[in-house]
Amino acid sequence: MTLEKNETNKSLIEKTQELENRYDIELSNTQKILLTTDGSITAILDVLYGKITLTTLDQHFEDADNAHAQLVNVDEGEEINYREVIMHRDGKPLIYAISHIPLKRCTKEVCADLIRADIPIGRILKNYHVESRREINNIFIEKPNDTLKELFKTDEDMLARDYVIINNDEILMWIKEVFPLSYFTEI
C-alpha cells in the first residue's frame, strides 16, 4: 500500500510540474498543497485563515444526464444533488466549488446537512465519521466563466482540480475546486 501511495504522490507532483512547465509558471507551495491534497481543503483553509465560512450559490436535485452520471458512476436519470458554493473568509472569496452527489449513496444525516447548505463537505464527512478517500482526477488551468469573474472580481486564469470522494469502494461525490492563479502565492 505504501508503494501505491508513493506512486500516487509522484503522479500528483508530476502533474503540478507539468502544469508549471506547460504554462511557464511557478506555483507556490500553498497552491501545490491545495491542488494535490487528498485531505480536506476546508481543514487547510481553516489552518491558514482561521475558520472559513461557506455560502451556497445554488443547490438543487436533478436527474443525472450522461456526463454527470459518468462522473459519479451511476445510471443516467438517477437523482443527484448539485451544489455550487464559495468558501470565504471575512467576505473574501477563497475557493469556488461545485459537486455532484448521488443521493442513494448518502445517509439521511449527510443528505440533511447537504440540504441545509452552508456546511463544507469536509466538515460534513468529519462530523459523521464517514470513512472516505479522495482520488484526484485532474489538475489544470482554465479560463474563468462569468460566475467566476463576478465572484473573484478578475478575469485571470484559474487553477482547478477535480476529484472524487470514495466511500465503500463507490463514488460518494465528485467535486471541482477553483481559485484564481494569483491566490495563495504569499503563504
Image (cartoon, rainbow, N blue to C red):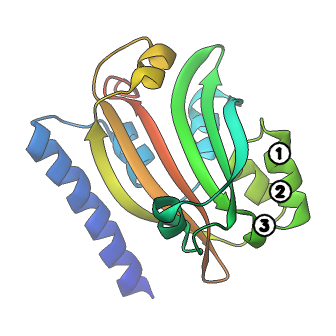
Q: Residue at x 29, y 37 (%)?
A: 142
- Residue at figure coordinates x 62%, y 24% from the top left: 88
Location of residue 38 with respect to 5 vertically, above or below: above
- Residue, disc 2: 111
> Horizontal and vertical percent for residue 101?
66, 59
Q: In the image, 29: left or right of 115?
A: left
Image quarter of residue 10: bottom left
Cβ–Cβ under 8 Å for marks 2 and 3: yes
Kind of residue at badge 1: Ile
Q: Confirm or deny contact between disc 2 and disc 1 (CB under 8 A).
A: yes
Residue 48, position as x, y percentages in the image = 56, 32
| Quarter of the view holding residue 146 | top left
Q: Residues within 10 Å of mark 2 (few under 14, many from 20)?
A: some
Label 1 SS: helix
Indicate which disc residue 173 carries.
Answer: none
Badges 1 and 3: C-beta atoms under 8 Å apart? no
Residue 38 can be seen, yes or no: no
* Three-letter amino acid code of the residue under disc 3: Cys
**Which quarter of the rendering shows the C terminus?**
top left
Residue in the picture at 63% in, 34% down: 85
Tell me the distance, in whole angstroms, between the alpha carbons under discs 1 and 3.
12 Å
Q: Which numbered marker is on residue 115?
A: 1
The answer to which of marks 2 and 3 sits earlier in the sequence is 3
List the residue tagged with mark 3.
106
Residue 126 at what x, y percent from top left? 76, 58
The secondary structure type at the circle numbered 3 is loop
| Residue 87 in the image: above or below residue 160 | above
